[in-house]
Image (cartoon, rainbow, N blue to C red):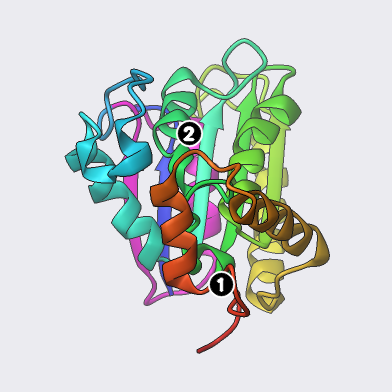
Amino acid sequence: MKIVLIHGQNHKGSSYHIGRLVAEKLGSGNEIREFFLPKDLEHFCRGCYKCIDDESRCPFYIQKKAIMENIENAELLIFTTPTYCMRASAPMKSFMDLTFTYWMIHRPRKAMFKKKAVVISTAAGRGMKTAIKDISNTLFYWGIPIIRHYGIAVQAMSWEQMADDKKEKIQKDTTKLASSLLRKKVKVGMKTKFMFYIMRMMQKADRGASPIEKKYWQDNGWLDKKRPWHEE
């Protein structure tokens, strides 16, 4: 299995360690690739809209492309973020902003409809739910049908400072999470299909962001009978 981890921080803290635990408990022999934000994508979206017509015109295309190619080729995505002021980290939010053209309303990628994802967030006390929601919303609009969540208040500033009973709980929880991921088959549900059809209607009615995006949908056959989750 190809697994990609996107970490919303450069340091290897509690969120990082939990993400690694999940990846490693999925079995040996898996291909694991990791990216750290902001190290691997150190920019904020400028709102120039150049990517609407041509992805390669994004000022940060090279860094973004290196990450997104790995994401598209992976079977499982694991996103980790500490809680910054009750939300996902700023580098993670920047990453989501820079990849907004992958949303169903723009140019969704067929590969996304065949993936599983996990979103992990830790905090000293509160905020994990809202941080997880930030990322989960993006993954849903990418078209990913299986999204699992794990949030926990670690009550510590680092993995090393965490209490042993808390680490024991994390070990048990990640074992269950990894097991459920291995059992779960990828199947696109009604919620994802409904959103796709809403976006399809908008493209057909010329209510998308540009004629080039509509052509993208036409070239994929999605304005006709083809669907991104069907095998060809």
Disc number placed over residue 89 in the picture, else none: none
Identify which residue is drawn at 50% across, 89% down. Answer: 232
Instruction: Determine which quarter of the picture holds residue 167.
Output: top right
Q: Residue 107: x, y in percent? A: 46, 52
Tell me the kind of residue under disc 1: Pro
Identify which residue is drawn at 51% across, 51% down. Answer: 78
- On the question of residue 24 being in view, the answer is no
User: Which residues fall within the magenta stretch?
Assistant: 11-38
Q: Secondary structure at mark 1?
A: loop
Q: Secondary structure at mark 2?
A: helix
Residue 105 vs residue 42, the one in the foreground: 105
Disc number placed over residue 96 in the picture, else none: 2
Q: Residues within 10 Å of mark 1 (few under 14, many from 20)?
A: many
Residue 7 against residue 180 in the figure, above or below: above
- On the question of residue 58 being in view, the answer is yes
Residue 108 vs residue 67, the one in the foreground: 108
Tell me the kind of residue under disc 2: Met
Q: State which quarter of the image contains the N terminus.
A: bottom left
Q: Which residue is mark 1?
A: 228
Q: CA distance from mark 2 to mark 1?
A: 22 Å
Instruction: Determine which quarter of the picture holds residue 12.
Output: top left
Residue 36 against residue 224 in the figure, above or below: above
